[in-house]
C-alpha cells in the first residue's frame, strides 16, 4: 500500500497543474498516469490558455520557459454576412488575451516546475476506488494500491450512469495545422459558418485550426487529398485569409455532457471527467484550471483534511456558477450561430455590430472569456 495525501489520476496538463497547485500549499501528491513519460511530453494537442490560466500557471511556477504563442487580438465574424467584432489585448491593458501552447510543452513545464511534494507513477491505470474510513483507496492494474485523503480525477470522460448528455451536437471537430499567405501577427480568428465554427489559433508561423463540421461531412473531408482539403477549408472560412496548406491531425465527436455530482466520497472530478463542452471559444481547459486552482485555495484555508465532505461540498457550490455559466455560454454560441435563416443571420450580424460599437459590452465578453463567470481574478 502506497500512502499519500492526494492522489491525482491523469498526468496530462490538467492533472499535473492540479498536483502542482496542491503541492505549492504543502500537500504530498502522487500523480497516476497510464502513459509513459515520453508519450505524455509528446502530446501534440494544442490548447488555448486564457490570460487567467497564464496567471494560474505563473502562481504554480510553470509559466517561465513555456513555449507560448500570444493571442494579441481575436477577430469574430460570420461567413458571408455583415457584422464582426474584434477583441484586443491592448484595449484591456493586457499583454495578451491568451496564449497557444502544445499540451506536451505544458506537461514538460509542469514537471520541471520548482518545488517538491509531487511524485509521478507512469504506466499505471486505476481500475477502481473504494472508501476506507477517512481515506480513499485506488486499485491499480499492476496489483498495487494507493491510499489518499483525497482523489482528484483529471482525465477521462463521463460514464452514462455518472452524467447526462444534455446535447448531442451532431458535429465533429477536425484538428488541423494550416499555413497562410501572410504573418498572423498574433491574430486569432473565430469564424462562424452554418455548418459550425472555424477557429484559427496562432501557433509558430502557422495556425492551429479547430474546424467544426457535421458528422457525415467530417468523414468526407478527412478523405480529401491535400489540395482539395485546402480548397474545402478556403470555401468554409471565406476570403479573409488565403490558405496555402492544411493538414488534419485528429477528429472527435462533440456533445455537451455534465457529471451530476462533481465531488463526493473523498473524490473530485475536473476537466472532461466533470464536464465536456463544445470547443467554441476555447473554454473547456480554462474552466478546468479554474476548478483546480479554487480547489487548492479551499484546501489551503482548511488543510486539516483535504477530502472532508464539507470542504468538497463548498468547493462544488463555489464552482457551480462558473461551471454552469460557461457551459451555457458555449452552448448558446453554437445554438445561435449555427441556426439557419436569413432573419436569424441578420440578427447575429446586428449583435456583432453592436458588440463592436459598444466598448462595455465588448469588454464584458473579453473578460468573460478570459476569467470565467466571475471575471476572476
Image (spheres, helix red, strand yellow):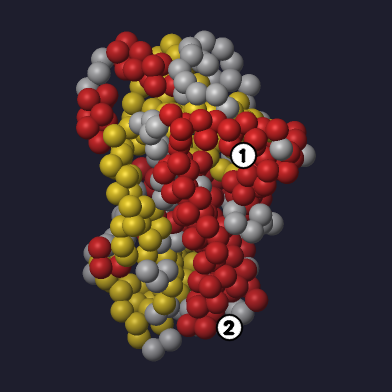
Residue 3 location, x and y as percent?
A: 42, 76
Q: Quadrant of the C terminus?
A: bottom right
User: Which residue matches tag 2?
Assistant: 304
User: Which residue matches tag 1?
Assistant: 98
In the visual, does 198 lie left or right of 49?
Answer: left
Q: How far apart are marks 1 and 2 (CA)?
A: 36 Å
Q: In which quarter of the image is the N terminus?
A: bottom left
- Residue at the far right in the pictured view: 93
Q: Do the residues labelled 1 and 2 touch (CB within 8 Å)?
A: no
In the displayed structure, 323 sits above or below 246; it is: below
Asked whether 75 or 252 is in front, the reply is: 75
State the residue at coordinates (66%, 32%).
356
Asked whether 210 or 113 is in front, the reply is: 210
In the displayed structure, 204 sits above or below 239; it is: below
What secondary structure is marked by label 1? Answer: strand
Residue 23 lies in quadrant: bottom right
State the residue at coordinates (75%, 33%).
90
Residue 2 location, x and y as percent?
A: 38, 74
Evaluate whether residue 20 shows in this view.
no
In the displayed structure, 272 sits above or below 48; it is: below
Amino acid at each position: 500500500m502506497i500512502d499519500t495525501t492526494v492522489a491525482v489520476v491523469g498526468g496530462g496538463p490538467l492533472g499535473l497543474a492540479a498536483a502542482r497547485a496542491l503541492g505549492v500549499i504543502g500537500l504530498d501528491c502522487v500523480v497516476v498516469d497510464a502513459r509513459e513519460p515520453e508519450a505524455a511530453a509528446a502530446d501534440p494537442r494544442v490548447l488555448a490558455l486564457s490570460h487567467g490560466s497564464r496567471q494560474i500557471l505563473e502562481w504554480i511556477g510553470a509559466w517561465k520557459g513555456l513555449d507560448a504563442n500570444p493571442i494579441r487580438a481575436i477577430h469574430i465574424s460570420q461567413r458571408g454576412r455583415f457584422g464582426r467584432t474584434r477583441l484586443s489585448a491592448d484595449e484591456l491593458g493586457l499583454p495578451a488575451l491568451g496564449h497557444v501552447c502544445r499540451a506536451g510543452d505544458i506537461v514538460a513545464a509542469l514537471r520541471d516546475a520548482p518545488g517538491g511534494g509531487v511524485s509521478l507513477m507512469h504506466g499505471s491505470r486505476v481500475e477502481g476506488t473504494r472508501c476506507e474510513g477517512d481515506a480513499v483507496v485506488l486499485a491499480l492494474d499492476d496489483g498495487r494500491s494507493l491510499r489518499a485523503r483525497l482523489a482528484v480525477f483529471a482525465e477521462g470522460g463521463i460514464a452514462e450512469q455518472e452524467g447526462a448528455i444534455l446535447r448531442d451536437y451532431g458535429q465533429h471537430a477536425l484538428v488541423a495545422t494550416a499555413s497562410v499567405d501572410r504573418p498572423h501577427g498574433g491574430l486569432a480568428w473565430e469564424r462562424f459558418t452554418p455548418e459550425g465554427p472555424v477557429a484559427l489559433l496562432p501557433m509558430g508561423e502557422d495556425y492551429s485550426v479547430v474546424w467544426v463540421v457535421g458528422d457525415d461531412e467530417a468523414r468526407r473531408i478527412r478523405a480529401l487529398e491535400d489540395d482539395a482539403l485546402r480548397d474545402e477549408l478556403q470555401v468554409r472560412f471565406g476570403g479573409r485569409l488565403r490558405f496555402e496548406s492544411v493538414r488534419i491531425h485528429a477528429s472527435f465527436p462533440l456533445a455537451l455532457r455534465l457529471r451530476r455530482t462533481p465531488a463526493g466520497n473523498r473524490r473530485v472530478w475536473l476537466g472532461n471527467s466533470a464536464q465536456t463542452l463544445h470547443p467554441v471559444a476555447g473554454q473547456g481547459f480554462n474552466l478546468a484550471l479554474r476548478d483546480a486552482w479554487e480547489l487548492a485555495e479551499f484546501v489551503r484555508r482548511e488543510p486539516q483534511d483535504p477530502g472532508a465532505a464539507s470542504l468538497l461540498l463548498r468547493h462544488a457550490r463555489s464552482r457551480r456558477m462558473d461551471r454552469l455559466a460557461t457551459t451555457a455560454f458555449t452552448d448558446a454560441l453554437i445554438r445561435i450561430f449555427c441556426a439557419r435563416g436569413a432573419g436569424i443571420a441578420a440578427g447575429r450580424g446586428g449583435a456583432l455590430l453592436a458588440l463592436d460599437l459598444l466598448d462595455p459590452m465588448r469588454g464584458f465578453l473579453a473578460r468573460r472569456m478570459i476569467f470565467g463567470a466571475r471575471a476572476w481574478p
